[in-house]
Image (spheres, helix red, strand yellow):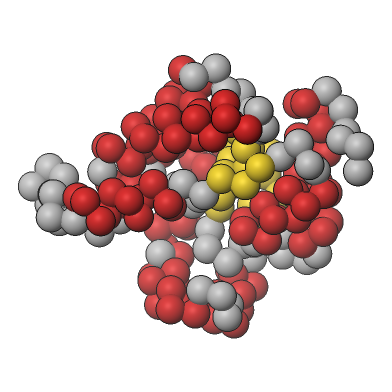
C-alpha cells in the first residue's frame, strides 16, 4: 500500500508523514522528490514539448520512475510507504496512481487542506524550507485551481487548519489501519 499525502505547501504533509511513521512501525517514509533530484541532475537541459522544465514533475520520466522506485522500496522492505509530494496537475496524478496500481499497490490518496491565511503563516515561518518561501507562495494560485480535482480524487480529505500534527496523523492513521486490517502494535 502507498499512502500518498498531497496538498498545498504549508499544509503539514511532511510533519504528518513523520508522525505516521513514528507511530506505526509498519510504515516507511518515501520522498518522490529524490527521484526528481536525480532527474534534474541528468535532464536539466532536456525540454518537454519544446519548453524549459520548471518542475521535475513535468518530465514524463519522473512520473514513470516514481512508481517503479516506490515499488522497489516497498518490495525490498516489505513495508507500506508514506509518500509526501504535492501533485497539482491532475493528469500527472492519474499517471502516478495508474503506475502504482499497475504494480499491485493499493493507493490511499490523502489530501490535506488548510485555510489560506494559515497556509501563508506556515510558509512564511517555515525554518526548514526557508529558501522555498517565495516559490511556495507563488504556487498558492496553482493549488487553488487544483483543489477541486484533488479533493474529488482523494480517498480522505483532512483540514489541518485548527488541528495539531498529532491529531492529523491520528486521523490518517485510522484510515491506514482500516486499509491494513487493523492497528499496528504501538
Residue at 13 percent of width and 49 percent of height: 47
Residue at 61 percent of width and 23 percent of height: 106
Please determine whether, in this image, residue 133 is positioned above or below residue 64.
Answer: below
Please determine whether, in this image, residue 56 is positioned above or below residue 49.
Answer: below
Residue at 49 percent of width and 40 percent of height: 149
Image quadrant where one finds the C terminus = top right
Residue 153 makes an appearance in the image: no
Residue at 57 percent of width and 26 percent of height: 75
Residue 52 left/right relative to 100: left
In the displayed orientation, state which residue is furthest to the front. Answer: 76
On the image, the x and y values in percent for residue 178 come to 81, 28
> Quarter-wise, where is residue 11 in the image?
bottom right
On the image, the x and y values in percent for residue 48 come to 16, 45
Residue 157 left/right relative to 186: left
On the image, the x and y values in percent for residue 113 come to 63, 55
Image quadrant where one finds the N terminus = top right
Residue 47 left/right relative to 2: left
Amino acid at each position: 500500500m502507498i499512502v500518498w499525502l498531497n496538498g498545498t505547501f504549508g499544509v503539514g504533509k511532511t510533519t504528518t508523514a513523520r508522525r505516521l511513521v513514528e507511530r506505526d512501525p509498519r510504515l516507511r517514509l518515501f520522498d518522490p522528490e529524490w527521484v526528481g533530484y536525480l532527474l534534474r541532475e541528468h535532464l536539466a537541459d532536456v525540454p518537454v514539448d519544446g519548453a524549459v522544465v520548471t518542475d521535475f514533475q513535468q518530465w514524463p520520466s519522473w512520473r514513470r520512475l516514481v512508481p517503479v522506485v516506490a515499488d522497489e522500496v516497498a518490495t525490498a522492505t516489505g513495508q507500506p510507504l508514506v509518500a509526501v509530494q504535492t501533485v497539482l496537475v491532475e493528469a500527472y496524478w492519474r499517471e502516478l496512481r495508474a503506475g502504482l496500481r499497475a504494480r499491485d499497490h493499493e493507493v490511499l490518496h490523502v489530501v490535506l487542506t488548510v485555510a489560506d491565511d494559515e497556509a501563508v503563516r506556515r510558509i512564511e515561518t517555515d525554518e526548514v524550507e526557508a529558501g522555498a518561501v517565495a516559490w511556495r507562495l507563488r504556487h498558492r494560485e496553482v493549488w487553488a485551481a487544483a483543489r477541486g480535482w484533488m479533493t474529488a480524487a482523494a480517498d480522505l480529505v483532512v483540514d489541518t487548519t485548527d488541528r495539531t500534527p498529532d491529531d492529523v496523523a491520528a486521523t490518517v492513521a485510522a484510515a491506514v489501519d482500516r486499509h491494513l486490517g487493523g492497528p499496528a502494535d504501538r
